[in-house]
Image (cartoon, rainbow, N blue to C red):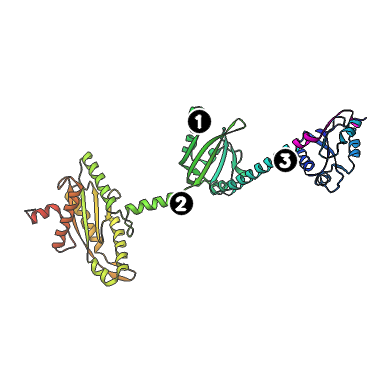
Amino acid sequence: MTTQRIQGHPVLIIGGGRGGNALLEMFLEDNLVKVIAIADINADAPGMRLAKENGIAAYTDPAEAIRACRDYPDCIVYNLSHDDSIAAQVMQVFGDKRVASGPEVKLFWQMVMNLKQTKGELEKSQGQLQAVIQNVMDGIITINESGEIQGFNPAAEQIFGYSQQDILGKNVKVLLSAQDQTEHDAYIHQYLHSEQGKALCIRGREMLAIRKNGEPFPMELSLSKMVLGGQNYFVGIARDITERKLAEQKIAHLAHYDFLTDLPNRALFLNSLELSLSLAKRNNYKVAVFFLDLDGFKKINDTLGHDAGDLLLQEVAKRLKKTIRASDTVARVGGDEFTFVLNNPGSEEGSALVAGKIIATLSELFDLNGKICHIGGSIGISLFPDDAQSLEQLVAQADGAMYLAKQSGKNTYKFHREVSDAHPGK
Protein backbone atom coordinates (compact mmCIF):
# COMPACT_ATOMS: atom_id res chain seq x y z
CA MET A 1 0.00 0.00 0.00
CA THR A 2 1.40 3.41 -0.98
CA THR A 3 0.87 6.07 1.66
CA GLN A 4 -0.39 9.37 0.26
CA ARG A 5 0.61 12.58 2.04
CA ILE A 6 -1.85 15.45 2.05
CA GLN A 7 -2.48 18.63 4.02
CA GLY A 8 -5.16 17.87 6.61
CA HIS A 9 -6.38 14.59 8.02
CA PRO A 10 -7.98 12.37 5.33
CA VAL A 11 -11.72 11.76 5.62
CA LEU A 12 -14.23 9.66 3.68
CA ILE A 13 -17.94 10.47 3.98
CA ILE A 14 -20.48 7.74 3.31
CA GLY A 15 -23.89 9.29 2.73
CA GLY A 16 -24.54 12.52 0.82
CA GLY A 17 -27.88 13.50 2.33
CA ARG A 18 -28.47 16.43 4.67
CA GLY A 19 -26.06 15.15 7.29
CA GLY A 20 -23.31 14.32 4.82
CA ASN A 21 -23.78 17.66 3.05
CA ALA A 22 -23.58 19.59 6.34
CA LEU A 23 -20.49 17.63 7.38
CA LEU A 24 -18.83 18.30 4.04
CA GLU A 25 -19.62 22.03 4.27
CA MET A 26 -17.97 22.18 7.69
CA PHE A 27 -14.89 20.21 6.61
CA LEU A 28 -14.44 22.40 3.52
CA GLU A 29 -13.89 25.36 5.81
CA ASP A 30 -11.39 23.56 8.07
CA ASN A 31 -7.72 23.21 7.08
CA LEU A 32 -7.25 20.39 9.59
CA VAL A 33 -9.41 18.06 7.49
CA LYS A 34 -9.12 16.92 3.88
CA VAL A 35 -12.17 15.15 2.41
CA ILE A 36 -10.82 12.50 0.01
CA ALA A 37 -14.16 11.27 -1.28
CA ILE A 38 -17.89 11.00 -0.66
CA ALA A 39 -20.27 8.19 -1.57
CA ASP A 40 -24.02 7.90 -1.92
CA ILE A 41 -26.18 5.62 -4.05
CA ASN A 42 -28.04 8.78 -5.15
CA ALA A 43 -25.81 10.69 -7.55
CA ASP A 44 -28.00 13.79 -7.11
CA ALA A 45 -27.77 13.90 -3.32
CA PRO A 46 -26.82 17.43 -2.08
CA GLY A 47 -23.53 16.21 -0.67
CA MET A 48 -22.62 14.61 -3.99
CA ARG A 49 -23.31 17.84 -5.88
CA LEU A 50 -21.30 19.88 -3.38
CA ALA A 51 -18.36 17.46 -3.68
CA LYS A 52 -18.32 17.73 -7.48
CA GLU A 53 -18.42 21.53 -7.26
CA ASN A 54 -15.31 21.42 -5.09
CA GLY A 55 -13.37 18.81 -7.08
CA ILE A 56 -13.88 15.97 -4.58
CA ALA A 57 -14.30 12.42 -5.83
CA ALA A 58 -17.93 11.25 -5.64
CA TYR A 59 -18.94 7.57 -5.83
CA THR A 60 -22.34 5.89 -6.11
CA ASP A 61 -20.81 2.64 -4.76
CA PRO A 62 -19.61 2.96 -1.11
CA ALA A 63 -17.35 -0.09 -1.47
CA GLU A 64 -15.59 1.49 -4.44
CA ALA A 65 -15.11 4.70 -2.46
CA ILE A 66 -13.59 2.76 0.45
CA ARG A 67 -11.16 0.97 -1.87
CA ALA A 68 -10.25 4.29 -3.52
CA CYS A 69 -9.10 5.58 -0.12
CA ARG A 70 -6.88 2.62 0.74
CA ASP A 71 -3.73 4.66 0.02
CA TYR A 72 -4.63 6.82 3.03
CA PRO A 73 -4.10 4.46 6.00
CA ASP A 74 -5.07 7.18 8.50
CA CYS A 75 -8.36 7.82 6.75
CA ILE A 76 -11.39 8.28 9.03
CA VAL A 77 -14.72 7.09 7.64
CA TYR A 78 -17.97 8.83 8.63
CA ASN A 79 -20.92 6.58 7.86
CA LEU A 80 -24.08 8.66 7.57
CA SER A 81 -25.92 6.02 5.57
CA HIS A 82 -28.19 3.29 6.92
CA ASP A 83 -25.90 0.54 5.59
CA ASP A 84 -24.58 -1.45 8.58
CA SER A 85 -22.15 -3.40 6.34
CA ILE A 86 -19.94 -0.33 5.90
CA ALA A 87 -17.99 -1.07 9.09
CA ALA A 88 -17.05 -4.55 7.82
CA GLN A 89 -15.99 -3.19 4.44
CA VAL A 90 -13.79 -0.59 6.15
CA MET A 91 -12.29 -3.35 8.30
CA GLN A 92 -11.34 -5.34 5.19
CA VAL A 93 -9.53 -2.38 3.60
CA PHE A 94 -7.93 -0.63 6.57
CA GLY A 95 -7.64 -3.50 9.02
CA ASP A 96 -9.26 -1.73 11.95
CA LYS A 97 -12.58 -0.21 12.97
CA ARG A 98 -11.80 3.31 11.83
CA VAL A 99 -15.41 4.17 11.21
CA ALA A 100 -17.99 6.32 12.98
CA SER A 101 -21.55 5.20 12.46
CA GLY A 102 -24.93 4.67 14.10
CA PRO A 103 -25.59 6.69 17.29
CA GLU A 104 -22.12 8.26 17.13
CA VAL A 105 -22.76 9.69 13.69
CA LYS A 106 -26.27 10.82 14.64
CA LEU A 107 -24.87 12.70 17.62
CA PHE A 108 -22.08 14.12 15.50
CA TRP A 109 -24.58 15.16 12.83
CA GLN A 110 -26.69 16.95 15.42
CA MET A 111 -23.58 18.73 16.68
CA VAL A 112 -22.71 19.78 13.15
CA MET A 113 -26.24 21.09 12.57
CA ASN A 114 -26.14 23.02 15.85
CA LEU A 115 -22.79 24.51 14.85
CA LYS A 116 -24.19 25.50 11.47
CA GLN A 117 -27.19 27.12 13.12
CA THR A 118 -24.96 28.94 15.60
CA LYS A 119 -22.69 30.04 12.78
CA GLY A 120 -25.67 31.26 10.78
CA GLU A 121 -27.01 33.24 13.72
CA LEU A 122 -23.57 34.67 14.38
CA GLU A 123 -23.14 35.68 10.73
CA LYS A 124 -26.60 37.26 10.79
CA SER A 125 -25.77 39.13 13.97
CA GLN A 126 -22.44 40.26 12.54
CA GLY A 127 -24.18 41.31 9.36
CA GLN A 128 -26.70 43.37 11.29
CA LEU A 129 -23.93 44.95 13.36
CA GLN A 130 -21.94 45.82 10.24
CA ALA A 131 -25.07 47.26 8.63
CA VAL A 132 -25.59 49.51 11.66
CA ILE A 133 -21.93 50.59 11.69
CA GLN A 134 -21.93 51.26 7.97
CA ASN A 135 -25.20 53.22 7.95
CA VAL A 136 -25.24 55.03 11.30
CA MET A 137 -24.97 58.83 11.01
CA ASP A 138 -22.38 59.14 13.79
CA GLY A 139 -18.73 58.44 13.16
CA ILE A 140 -17.45 55.25 14.79
CA ILE A 141 -13.69 55.10 15.30
CA THR A 142 -11.74 52.25 16.89
CA ILE A 143 -8.17 52.70 18.12
CA ASN A 144 -5.68 50.50 19.92
CA GLU A 145 -3.61 51.37 23.01
CA SER A 146 -1.04 53.14 20.84
CA GLY A 147 -3.71 55.40 19.40
CA GLU A 148 -3.57 53.83 15.95
CA ILE A 149 -6.90 53.87 14.12
CA GLN A 150 -8.19 50.35 13.52
CA GLY A 151 -11.74 51.11 12.38
CA PHE A 152 -13.30 54.08 10.57
CA ASN A 153 -16.90 53.83 9.37
CA PRO A 154 -18.43 55.73 6.38
CA ALA A 155 -19.93 58.41 8.64
CA ALA A 156 -16.46 59.10 10.07
CA GLU A 157 -15.16 59.38 6.50
CA GLN A 158 -17.80 61.98 5.74
CA ILE A 159 -17.25 63.92 8.97
CA PHE A 160 -13.45 64.09 8.80
CA GLY A 161 -12.88 63.92 5.03
CA TYR A 162 -10.52 60.92 5.21
CA SER A 163 -11.11 57.62 3.44
CA GLN A 164 -10.46 54.39 5.34
CA GLN A 165 -7.45 53.79 3.12
CA ASP A 166 -6.05 57.21 4.11
CA ILE A 167 -6.60 56.96 7.84
CA LEU A 168 -6.27 53.33 8.98
CA GLY A 169 -3.04 52.83 10.92
CA LYS A 170 -2.53 56.54 11.58
CA ASN A 171 -2.59 57.99 15.08
CA VAL A 172 -5.97 59.34 16.12
CA LYS A 173 -4.34 62.63 17.14
CA VAL A 174 -4.36 63.66 13.48
CA LEU A 175 -8.11 64.23 13.98
CA LEU A 176 -7.71 66.46 17.05
CA SER A 177 -6.70 70.07 17.74
CA ALA A 178 -3.37 70.71 19.46
CA GLN A 179 -4.99 71.23 22.87
CA ASP A 180 -7.12 68.11 22.61
CA GLN A 181 -4.12 66.04 21.47
CA THR A 182 -2.49 66.72 24.84
CA GLU A 183 -5.70 65.96 26.73
CA HIS A 184 -6.13 62.75 24.70
CA ASP A 185 -2.71 61.46 25.81
CA ALA A 186 -3.56 62.24 29.43
CA TYR A 187 -6.92 60.46 29.19
CA ILE A 188 -5.45 57.30 27.67
CA HIS A 189 -2.64 57.19 30.26
CA GLN A 190 -5.15 57.62 33.08
CA TYR A 191 -7.47 54.90 31.83
CA LEU A 192 -4.67 52.42 31.25
CA HIS A 193 -2.84 52.97 34.52
CA SER A 194 -5.56 53.56 37.07
CA GLU A 195 -8.53 51.74 38.51
CA GLN A 196 -10.77 54.22 36.72
CA GLY A 197 -9.61 52.67 33.49
CA LYS A 198 -11.33 49.42 34.43
CA ALA A 199 -14.67 50.96 33.50
CA LEU A 200 -13.91 53.71 30.99
CA CYS A 201 -16.97 55.59 29.79
CA ILE A 202 -16.88 59.18 28.52
CA ARG A 203 -20.17 60.59 27.32
CA GLY A 204 -20.80 63.73 25.33
CA ARG A 205 -17.41 65.37 25.78
CA GLU A 206 -17.16 68.45 23.55
CA MET A 207 -13.86 69.11 21.83
CA LEU A 208 -12.34 70.72 18.76
CA ALA A 209 -11.63 68.33 15.88
CA ILE A 210 -9.77 68.86 12.60
CA ARG A 211 -10.91 67.77 9.14
CA LYS A 212 -8.50 66.52 6.48
CA ASN A 213 -8.50 69.97 4.84
CA GLY A 214 -7.39 71.56 8.13
CA GLU A 215 -10.81 73.00 8.98
CA PRO A 216 -11.57 72.92 12.73
CA PHE A 217 -15.07 72.03 13.89
CA PRO A 218 -16.83 71.30 17.21
CA MET A 219 -17.25 67.60 17.93
CA GLU A 220 -19.05 65.64 20.64
CA LEU A 221 -17.22 62.45 21.59
CA SER A 222 -18.35 59.43 23.58
CA LEU A 223 -15.59 56.93 24.36
CA SER A 224 -15.54 53.45 25.87
CA LYS A 225 -12.92 50.76 26.36
CA MET A 226 -13.22 47.15 25.24
CA VAL A 227 -10.92 44.16 25.61
CA LEU A 228 -10.59 41.85 22.62
CA GLY A 229 -8.16 38.96 22.49
CA GLY A 230 -6.44 40.24 25.60
CA GLN A 231 -5.79 43.62 23.97
CA ASN A 232 -7.28 46.99 25.00
CA TYR A 233 -9.18 48.95 22.37
CA PHE A 234 -11.10 52.21 22.53
CA VAL A 235 -14.29 52.79 20.60
CA GLY A 236 -15.24 56.42 19.99
CA ILE A 237 -18.55 57.73 18.67
CA ALA A 238 -17.95 61.13 17.08
CA ARG A 239 -20.68 63.59 16.21
CA ASP A 240 -20.23 66.83 14.26
CA ILE A 241 -22.12 69.42 16.34
CA THR A 242 -21.43 72.44 14.12
CA GLU A 243 -25.11 73.01 13.38
CA ARG A 244 -26.07 72.59 17.04
CA LYS A 245 -23.43 75.10 18.14
CA LEU A 246 -24.60 77.61 15.53
CA ALA A 247 -28.18 77.17 16.73
CA GLU A 248 -27.10 77.64 20.36
CA GLN A 249 -25.17 80.78 19.41
CA LYS A 250 -28.19 82.10 17.53
CA ILE A 251 -30.49 81.45 20.48
CA ALA A 252 -28.02 83.10 22.87
CA HIS A 253 -27.70 86.07 20.52
CA LEU A 254 -31.48 86.46 20.27
CA ALA A 255 -31.69 86.40 24.05
CA HIS A 256 -29.34 89.37 24.38
CA TYR A 257 -29.71 91.37 21.16
CA ASP A 258 -32.54 93.29 19.55
CA PHE A 259 -33.81 91.32 16.53
CA LEU A 260 -34.33 94.43 14.36
CA THR A 261 -31.20 96.53 14.94
CA ASP A 262 -28.87 93.82 16.33
CA LEU A 263 -28.00 96.16 19.18
CA PRO A 264 -27.85 94.85 22.74
CA ASN A 265 -31.29 94.61 24.36
CA ARG A 266 -32.32 95.84 27.80
CA ALA A 267 -31.02 92.73 29.59
CA LEU A 268 -27.56 92.95 28.05
CA PHE A 269 -27.48 96.72 28.58
CA LEU A 270 -28.12 96.26 32.31
CA ASN A 271 -25.42 93.57 32.49
CA SER A 272 -22.96 95.90 30.76
CA LEU A 273 -23.89 98.76 33.08
CA GLU A 274 -23.46 96.59 36.17
CA LEU A 275 -19.99 95.52 35.01
CA SER A 276 -19.04 99.10 34.16
CA LEU A 277 -20.08 100.34 37.61
CA SER A 278 -18.06 97.57 39.28
CA LEU A 279 -14.94 98.50 37.31
CA ALA A 280 -15.50 102.23 37.92
CA LYS A 281 -15.68 101.68 41.68
CA ARG A 282 -12.47 99.67 41.61
CA ASN A 283 -10.58 102.14 39.41
CA ASN A 284 -12.20 105.34 40.68
CA TYR A 285 -13.56 106.80 37.45
CA LYS A 286 -16.93 108.03 36.19
CA VAL A 287 -19.61 106.29 34.13
CA ALA A 288 -22.22 108.15 32.09
CA VAL A 289 -25.67 106.73 31.34
CA PHE A 290 -27.56 108.17 28.34
CA PHE A 291 -31.26 107.75 27.61
CA LEU A 292 -32.16 108.68 24.02
CA ASP A 293 -35.66 109.08 22.59
CA LEU A 294 -36.03 109.88 18.87
CA ASP A 295 -37.87 113.08 17.90
CA GLY A 296 -40.27 112.76 14.98
CA PHE A 297 -40.17 108.97 14.68
CA LYS A 298 -43.93 108.46 15.21
CA LYS A 299 -44.79 110.79 12.34
CA ILE A 300 -42.55 108.86 9.91
CA ASN A 301 -43.88 105.51 11.13
CA ASP A 302 -47.48 106.72 10.66
CA THR A 303 -47.01 108.40 7.26
CA LEU A 304 -44.49 106.14 5.54
CA GLY A 305 -45.48 102.84 7.17
CA HIS A 306 -43.95 100.38 9.59
CA ASP A 307 -41.46 99.03 7.03
CA ALA A 308 -40.01 102.51 6.65
CA GLY A 309 -40.02 102.87 10.44
CA ASP A 310 -38.09 99.62 10.83
CA LEU A 311 -35.58 100.69 8.20
CA LEU A 312 -35.14 104.04 9.95
CA LEU A 313 -34.40 102.32 13.28
CA GLN A 314 -31.80 100.14 11.56
CA GLU A 315 -30.11 103.19 10.03
CA VAL A 316 -30.21 105.00 13.38
CA ALA A 317 -28.52 102.01 15.04
CA LYS A 318 -25.69 102.09 12.48
CA ARG A 319 -25.06 105.79 13.11
CA LEU A 320 -25.17 105.43 16.88
CA LYS A 321 -22.58 102.64 16.89
CA LYS A 322 -20.20 104.90 14.94
CA THR A 323 -20.42 107.71 17.49
CA ILE A 324 -19.22 105.75 20.50
CA ARG A 325 -16.02 103.92 21.38
CA ALA A 326 -15.66 100.14 21.20
CA SER A 327 -15.48 100.06 25.01
CA ASP A 328 -18.88 101.76 25.33
CA THR A 329 -22.35 100.28 24.82
CA VAL A 330 -25.45 101.39 22.94
CA ALA A 331 -28.68 99.36 23.28
CA ARG A 332 -32.23 99.50 22.00
CA VAL A 333 -34.58 99.18 24.97
CA GLY A 334 -37.93 100.12 23.43
CA GLY A 335 -39.65 101.18 20.21
CA ASP A 336 -37.54 104.31 19.51
CA GLU A 337 -35.65 104.41 22.80
CA PHE A 338 -31.93 103.79 23.11
CA THR A 339 -29.60 103.72 26.11
CA PHE A 340 -25.82 104.16 26.36
CA VAL A 341 -23.07 103.29 28.82
CA LEU A 342 -19.98 105.48 28.50
CA ASN A 343 -16.99 104.23 30.47
CA ASN A 344 -14.68 106.88 31.94
CA PRO A 345 -15.95 109.84 29.89
CA GLY A 346 -13.86 112.17 32.01
CA SER A 347 -15.56 115.41 32.95
CA GLU A 348 -19.19 116.37 32.39
CA GLU A 349 -18.01 118.15 29.27
CA GLY A 350 -16.81 114.82 27.85
CA SER A 351 -20.30 113.36 28.15
CA ALA A 352 -21.80 116.52 26.65
CA LEU A 353 -19.43 116.22 23.69
CA VAL A 354 -20.61 112.66 22.93
CA ALA A 355 -24.28 113.69 23.34
CA GLY A 356 -23.72 116.53 20.88
CA LYS A 357 -22.22 114.12 18.34
CA ILE A 358 -25.23 111.82 18.67
CA ILE A 359 -27.69 114.66 18.10
CA ALA A 360 -25.64 115.90 15.13
CA THR A 361 -25.52 112.51 13.41
CA LEU A 362 -29.28 112.03 13.91
CA SER A 363 -29.95 115.46 12.40
CA GLU A 364 -28.51 114.40 9.04
CA LEU A 365 -31.09 113.34 6.45
CA PHE A 366 -32.07 109.65 6.15
CA ASP A 367 -32.68 107.98 2.78
CA LEU A 368 -35.28 105.24 3.27
CA ASN A 369 -35.31 103.51 -0.11
CA GLY A 370 -35.68 106.82 -1.94
CA LYS A 371 -37.84 108.50 0.69
CA ILE A 372 -35.90 111.32 2.35
CA CYS A 373 -36.74 112.19 5.95
CA HIS A 374 -35.20 113.76 9.02
CA ILE A 375 -35.54 113.25 12.75
CA GLY A 376 -33.90 114.43 15.93
CA GLY A 377 -33.10 113.10 19.36
CA SER A 378 -33.58 114.08 22.98
CA ILE A 379 -30.99 112.76 25.43
CA GLY A 380 -30.96 112.53 29.22
CA ILE A 381 -27.66 111.99 31.07
CA SER A 382 -26.87 110.74 34.58
CA LEU A 383 -23.40 110.29 36.04
CA PHE A 384 -21.87 107.77 38.40
CA PRO A 385 -20.98 108.35 41.17
CA ASP A 386 -22.10 112.01 41.13
CA ASP A 387 -25.86 111.42 40.71
CA ALA A 388 -26.40 107.90 42.07
CA GLN A 389 -24.69 104.66 43.07
CA SER A 390 -27.14 102.04 41.77
CA LEU A 391 -27.83 101.21 38.14
CA GLU A 392 -31.61 101.45 38.70
CA GLN A 393 -31.32 105.02 39.94
CA LEU A 394 -28.93 106.00 37.16
CA VAL A 395 -31.28 104.70 34.45
CA ALA A 396 -34.30 106.37 36.06
CA GLN A 397 -32.39 109.67 36.37
CA ALA A 398 -31.27 109.55 32.73
CA ASP A 399 -34.88 108.85 31.72
CA GLY A 400 -36.08 111.86 33.71
CA ALA A 401 -33.41 114.09 32.18
CA MET A 402 -34.53 112.95 28.72
CA TYR A 403 -38.07 114.18 29.43
CA LEU A 404 -36.62 117.54 30.44
CA ALA A 405 -34.82 117.68 27.08
CA LYS A 406 -38.16 116.99 25.36
CA GLN A 407 -39.81 119.80 27.33
CA SER A 408 -36.92 122.12 26.45
CA GLY A 409 -37.66 122.00 22.71
CA LYS A 410 -36.34 118.57 21.76
CA ASN A 411 -33.20 117.73 19.74
CA THR A 412 -30.99 118.53 22.72
CA TYR A 413 -29.53 116.91 25.85
CA LYS A 414 -29.93 117.52 29.58
CA PHE A 415 -28.11 116.29 32.69
CA HIS A 416 -29.83 114.94 35.79
CA ARG A 417 -28.59 117.88 37.85
CA GLU A 418 -30.55 120.15 35.51
CA VAL A 419 -33.74 118.29 36.45
CA SER A 420 -33.04 119.13 40.07
CA ASP A 421 -32.41 122.76 39.12
CA ALA A 422 -35.65 122.94 37.09
CA HIS A 423 -37.66 121.16 39.80
CA PRO A 424 -36.00 121.95 43.15
CA GLY A 425 -38.50 119.81 45.03
CA LYS A 426 -37.39 116.61 43.21
As measured in the structure, the alpha-carbon distance from the residue carrying label 2 to the one carrying label 3 is: 52 Å
Is residue 205 highlighted in magenta? no
| Numbered tag placed on residue 113 in the rendering | 3
Q: Is residue 7 visible?
A: no
With respect to residue 205, does 409 lie above or below?
below
Q: Amino acid at mark 1?
A: Gly
Q: Quadrant of the N terminus?
A: top right
* Image-based side of 333 in relation to 215, left or right: left
Instruction: Determine which of the numbered discs, if any, sits on residue 92 in the image.
Output: none
Looking at the image, tell me whether mark 2 or mark 3 is earlier in sequence order: 3
Q: Position of residue 92 (x, y in %)?
A: 91, 31
Q: Residue 142 vs residue 257: left or right?
A: right
Magenta residues, as a range? 93-108
* Residue 358 visible at all: yes
Q: What is the C-alpha distance between the residues marked 1 and 3?
A: 41 Å
Three-letter code, disc 3: Met
Judging by the rendered image, the residue that carries numbered circle 2 is 243
Task: Name the front one of labels 1 and 2.
Answer: 1
Q: Which mark is residue 197?
A: 1
Q: Is residue 104 placed above or below 335 in the rendered structure?
A: above
> Residue sitting at 28 percent across and 61 percent down?
316
Residue located farthest toward the left when viewing the structure as drawn: 425
